[in-house]
Structure formats: C-alpha cells, structure tokens
Amino acid sequence: MRAFVVKKYRRPLELQEVAEPEVGDTDVLVRVEAAGVNQLDEKIRSGEFAQILPYALPLVLGNDVAGTVIRVGRLVRGFRPGDEVYARPDAARIGTFAERIAVDEADLAAKPANISMAEAGSLPLVALTAWQALVERGRLAPGQKVLIHAGAGGVGSIAIQLARHLGAHVATTASGANADFVRDLGADVVIDYRREDFAEVLSGYDLVLDSLGGENLEKSLRVLKPGGRAIGISGPPDPAFARAAGLHPLLVLAITALSRRIRRQAKRLGVAYEFLFMHADGEQLREITDLVERRVIRPIVARTYPFAQVPEALADVAAGVSRGKVVITVSS
C-alpha cells in the first residue's frame, strides 16, 4: 500500500510502498478515508520530539483517522466490516497518512453519524486533547473560569465549545479577525493578542489551557487564582510526564531541568503547571461522538487536501492555520 514516510528527520515526507498493516487479535483494519494534519506531525517530522517520542525510522506519519472497517481481529466484538469509525491511534502505532491502518479496538469509536468523513478525521487528536485537559485533568466545573489560548486553532476551537458545554466562563486569545468566530463558538471574553496583553486584562482564573508555551505560558500563570492550574500542550514536558512515559532516567533528569523554571514560577505564585501529552482513548472518543451528534461540538475544517498533497498540507499546518484543522482526504 502507499504511505507518506519520514525517512530522516527534517527532510520532506516521501510517498512510497510499505507493507500492509499487521492485524492482531484486538485490532481493527481501517481503510483511511480522511486524516487530520496536526502540529504534532510537524514536530515529529522535524525531530523536535525525537527525545520524548523515540520512533524508529522510516516512520509512516499521521495521528488522526476516519474511515471504514475492512476486517477485524478474532477477539474484536465492538466493530465489524463496513462500520464507519474514527480514532487517534496509540502513540506507538501512528501512521494514518496511508491507505490503511490497524487500530486497537480500545482506541476506536463509531464515527458521528451527522458529519462527513473529513470532519470526523479532523477531530480525534484535538477533541481528545480538549477532553483530557478540561475534563480528565482540569475537572472543569460549572461557574469556573478558563482561559483557552489560540481559540481559533484546532485544539482551541474544540476546547471553547467543550468548556461552554461544561458551564464554564470562557476567555480566549485570538486575532481581531477571528473575534466573532470564537464568540460564536462560545467564548465570553476575547483578547486580541495583537493589541492587548491578556495578563494585564484577566485575573482570578481556575484553569488555563496553553498551546503556545514559552513566554505565553509564563504570563498565563499570572492570570490564575491561588490553587489554579495551567495545562500546557506545547511544553516544556514535566517530570511526571517523563516518568509515566517510561523514559530513560537520564532523560527524566534532563526534562526535570528543562521544566524547573516554569514549575518554580508556578510554585511561587501558588499555582500549578502540568504538561499534557494526550493519549488515545476510544471510550472518551465515544463521549465526543455523543456531543457531536447532539450538536454540542461541531468540527472546524479549514481546508482539505488530496492524499497526494500530504507534504503541502503539512507545510500549511507548520505555517499556521487561522481556523480549525487541515484534513487529508483519501480516495478509495
């Protein structure tokens, strides 16, 4: 089958023939019909995440899939050929920029019936990230205040909708051109990051979801109330992540040093910082399916590209997309 492969870090993806996926007892073989393109894909291709995600090369890239079940392993009970499904495969088994992929049944969910394959392909990674940040980690409750950075982006656009559903007061950062867009998604307060300093405007927040890192993350700590929490998805990784990921002890030490500054700043302010690297979870994805079918959450697709243009789509994402997600569509 055909797939786009990382052969060397920092080099362009290459389209080549690769072996068919092996289908284990609990696996589901999916014909890929759509695949979301994420910043994570670019970070992997560039080698930026090589230490915390030590993939063997060559590697088939791609972290989102929507498609149709072709066949199932002998122990699979929840899916059958012909089912329309979507998933974020386990981090150890990525490879959705291909014509077919085997996904563990536990990571898979039925595709929402009311959206297209392209829309479904845009959702798994960003929707699971939002769920794990706001629900699993953040335990966001009605009446609490949350700041979601980059509200027009892939994660931000879904997180705003989820936070609104959870009953939170939602602030977000966006360009002035996207102000009405993020308000329509559910933002109560919109900070134009080109004209205003959010740290001078906002205060007393329970939770921040930061997708930018660096100075933006440091300033985010200052808008939290005592006991509040900043959850970062762009880093720096923290010791808890390193230990949970089973990284080499020397790498754990290096990550501990890398995140020491932000953790110390958080401690001085009486708040907390956590790094989130989202994980595959079919059960959580089924919760998201329900929200999509009830029209609580709607996917935002900025552009679609045909399968042959995966490198162009990845370059588009690396350059920055103003609204929602870029999606690859694969003809059967």
Image (cartoon, helix red, strand yellow):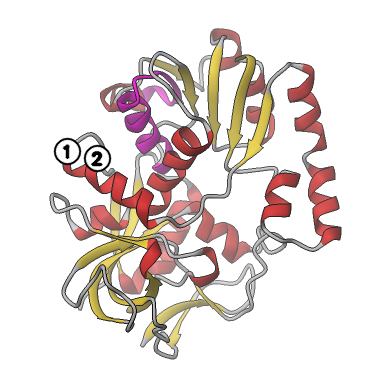
Please determine whether, in this image, residue 168 is positioned above or below residue 121: above
In depth, the one of 199 and 208 nearer the eye is: 208
The count of marks equals: 2
Q: Residues within 10 Å of mark 1 (few under 14, many from 20)?
A: few
Please determine whether, in this image, residue 1 is positioned above or below residue 63: below
Figure quadrant of residue 267 = top right
In percent of the image, x 39 and y 68: which residue is there? 310
On screen, residue 67 versus residue 127, left or right, reads left
In percent of the image, x 48 and y 38: which residue is there? 136
Q: Mark 1 points at which residue?
A: 294
In percent of the image, x 33 and y 82: which residue is there? 73
Q: Is residue 116 visible to us here?
A: yes
The picture places residue 92, in percent across and down from the top left corner, at: 55, 69
Figure quadrant of residue 159 = top left
Q: Which amino acid does label 2 sit on?
A: Leu
Image disc number at residue 291:
2
Please determine whether, in this image, residue 137 is positioned above or below residue 33: above
The picture places residue 288, in percent across and down from the top left corner, at: 30, 45
Image disc number at residue 93:
none
Circles 2, 1 touching at the beta carbon (< 8 Å): yes
Q: Which amino acid does label 1 sit on?
A: Arg
Q: Residues within 10 Å of mark 2 (few under 14, many from 20)?
A: some
Q: Magenta segment range?
A: 154-177
The picture places residue 97, in percent across and down from the top left corner, at: 40, 71
In percent of the image, x 51 and y 60: which residue is there? 41
